[in-house]
Amino acid sequence: MVSKVAVVKTTKNLQASLHHAFKLIGGIDDLNTPERQVVIKPGIFDHRKNTHPTVGLVGAIASCFNRAPKTLLAESDNYRGLASERLDIYKEIFNQQVLPFNLSEDSNTRGILIGNEKIGLSHILFKPSVFVSTHLLRKYSKGTILKNLLGLIPDRKKVRFHKNLVTVLLDAYKVIGGIDLAVLDATHIRSGRHTVDANIIVVGRDAVAVEAVGATLVGMKPKKMPIIKEAMNRGYGEGRIDEIDVCGIPIEGLAEEIHQQVVQLRSSS
């Protein structure tokens, strides 16, 4: 089956933008059901910096799962602070159905071998839960959507995993049964010290393909990224951009547009 990835412009109605993207990739009806709890993992490294998916987009993602019995925004503690502190940036979207969840405080865990180390992962991460990974689109060789999986590990000091990062991330991917939906927030794209207002989202059911399309948009070569190469070797998704059905905005012109904006910002700074 060909992997489909939607690249669409965002509007003030972010939920409508997401529904448009979902339609392009074939829908998410099998994920949005009364039988399956949803876990959304936003990429939040430091809540004191604007380097996380926007509140509006995460709220819109949660709203799209209107049939789910519960939607949990999940994060773990890290050396920058507690998960509860970082998740607080999304407090305006919390209600009886959408709740914060600190993975580091869950006592109901399953011992899993990840990167040759036994780690206790929260029970909410395993199927039948629907797992959604959302992160900012950025130029980063270690990935975004897949790199986000490091935050599933409850330890505060995760730096030790960086020496074997690709294996750790993909081991985590395997044990939770994969990423069911990947959403890259490219409202603003950071390139070094500069920020480009792109106002797009990249959405797909194949997280590896979404990672590859996002990397292409910021001028990277997916086939040279170790995380994508190894994910393909393991059969977790499609990382060859020519083999991905990109729907919506043509990425060739968009990638050039983003590049030109970065060049202009650099020349004027």
Image (cartoon, rainbow, N blue to C red):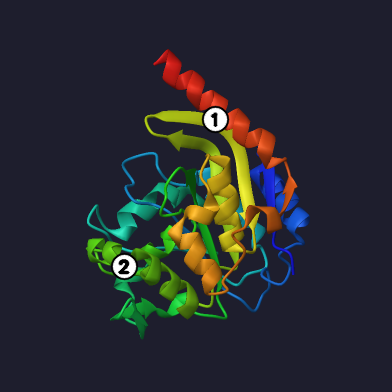
Q: CA distance from mark 2 to mark 1?
A: 31 Å
Q: Left of 23 or right of it: where is 49?
A: left
Which of the 4 image quarters holds residue 236? Answer: bottom right
Amino acid bearing label 1? His
Residue 199, image x and y in percent? 60, 35
Seen at 61% across and 31% down, the residue is 256
Residue that badge 1 annotates? 259
- The quarter in which the N terminus is drawn is bottom right
Residue 249's spot in the image, x, y percent?
A: 72, 40
Q: Residue at left 40%, top 47%?
A: 89
**In front of the other: 267 or 200:** 267
Residue at screen point 43% across, 54% down? 43
Query: Horizontal placement of 65 versus 126: left or right?
Result: right
Disc assigned to residue 213: none
Extreme-front residue of the structure: 224
Q: Would you say 190 lies left or right of 117 here?
A: right
Residue 34 place in picture, x, y as percent: 66, 75
> Could you tell which of marks 2 and 1 lies nearer the N-terminus?
2
Q: Residues within 10 Å of mark 1 (few under 14, many from 20)?
A: some
- Eyeballing the image, is 37 above or below 229? below
Is 166 placed left or right of 238 in the picture?
A: left
Question: Mark 2 — residue?
Answer: 164
119 and 62: which one is in front? 119
Label 2 CA crowd tier, 10 Å (few <14, some 14–19, many 20+): few
For the C terminus, which image quadrant?
top left
